[in-house]
Image (tube, rainbow, N blue to C red):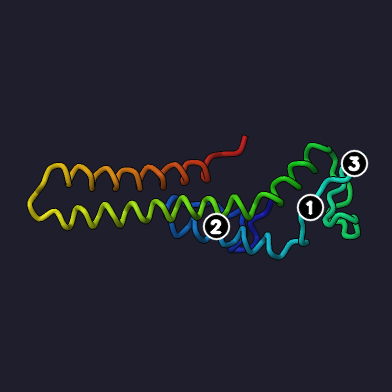
C-alpha cells in the first residue's frame, strides 16, 4: 500500500506510546469510514460484502478466496483488537503510575518497597516493548 497520506494507517510505527496511540486512532478512523458491517465472504467468487442480504458489495473479485477471508476477518475483528491493545497500553500506564508513586513514596528507603516499585516499572516497560515489537515487526 502507498504512504501518500501523512496519517495513513500503513505509515511506519515508532516505538513510543504517542505513535502507537496515533496509529490506533488512524485505524479506527479508517474502519469507521469503511462500509459498515459486519462483512462476510460470498461463496465461490471471493467477493467481500457487507450486510446479510449482500446488498452492498465492498470488493468485487478478490483473486484468492483466502485473501477475501483475511480481509473479512481483519475488518470484523478490528474494533475488538484495537480496544484490546488500548487496554494493554492503559494497563502499562497504570503500572507505570503505580510504580512511580511507590518509588516516590519510599521515604524510608525500604528495600521491599523499592523492589516492588521497580517490578511495576519493569512490567510497564515489558508491556510497551512487547506491543512495540509486535507492531514494528516485518510482515511474513
Helix, strand or loop status at disc 3 = loop
Kindly indicate the quadrant of the structure image that contains residue 70: top right
Pick the residue in front: 114 or 130.
Answer: 114
Q: Position of residue 121 (x, y in %)?
A: 29, 48
83 on left or right of 114: right
**Residue that carries the numbered disc 1 in the rendered image:** 39
**Residue visible at 17% across and 46% down?**
114
Q: Is residue 13 left or right of residue 80?
A: left
On screen, residue 107 versus residue 94, left or right, reads left
Q: Quadrant location of the C terminus? A: top right
Marks 1 and 2 close (CB-CB < 8 Å): no
Q: Residues within 10 Å of mark 3 (few under 14, many from 20)?
A: few
Q: Give me the residue at 51% from left, 44% from top.
A: 136
Residue under label 3, please give it. 43
Residues under numbered marks 1 and 3 in contact, where contact means CB atoms less than 8 Å apart: no
Question: Does dot 1 land on a helix, a strand or a loop?
Answer: strand
N-terminal of the pair, mark 1 or mark 2, is 2
Q: Is residue 67 above or below residue 108?
A: above
Give the image location of residue 68, x and y in percent: 80, 43
Which mark is in front, 2 or 3?
Answer: 3
Label 1, label 3: how many angstroms apart (C-alpha)?
Answer: 13 Å
Q: Nearer the viewer, mark 1 or mark 2?
A: 1
Q: Which mark is residue 132?
A: none
| CA separation in Å, label 1 and label 2 | 23 Å
Pinpoint residue 59: horizontal percent, then vertical percent: 84, 53
Mark 2 → mark 3, Cα distance in angstroms: 33 Å
Label 1 crowd (10 A; few <14 / some 14-19 / many >=20): many
Q: Disc 2 designates what residue?
A: 23
Tell me which numbered mark, 2 or 3, is placed earlier along the sequence.
2
Give the tally of numbered discs: 3
Q: Position of residue 71 (x, y in %)?
A: 75, 46
Amino acid at each position: 500500500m502507498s504512504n501518500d497520506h501523512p496519517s495513513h494507517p500503513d505509515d511506519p510505527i515508532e516505538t513510543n506510546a504517542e505513535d502507537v496511540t496515533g496509529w490506533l486512532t488512524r485505524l479506527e478512523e479508517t474502519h469507521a469510514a469503511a462500509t459498515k458491517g459486519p462483512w462476510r465472504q460470498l461463496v465461490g467468487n471471493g467477493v467481500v460484502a457487507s450486510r446479510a442480504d449482500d446488498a452492498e458489495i465492498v470488493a468485487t473479485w478478490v483473486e484468492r478466496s483466502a485473501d477475501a477471508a483475511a480481509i473479512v476477518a481483519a475488518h470484523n475483528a478490528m474494533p475488538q483488537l484495537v480496544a484490546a491493545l488500548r487496554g494493554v497500553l492503559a494497563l502499562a500506564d497504570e503500572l507505570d503510575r503505580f510504580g512511580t508513586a511507590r518509588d516516590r513514596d519510599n521515604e524510608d528507603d525500604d528495600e521491599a518497597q523499592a523492589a516492588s516499585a521497580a517490578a511495576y516499572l519493569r512490567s510497564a516497560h515489558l508491556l510497551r516493548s512487547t506491543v512495540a515489537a509486535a507492531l514494528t515487526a516485518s510482515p511474513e
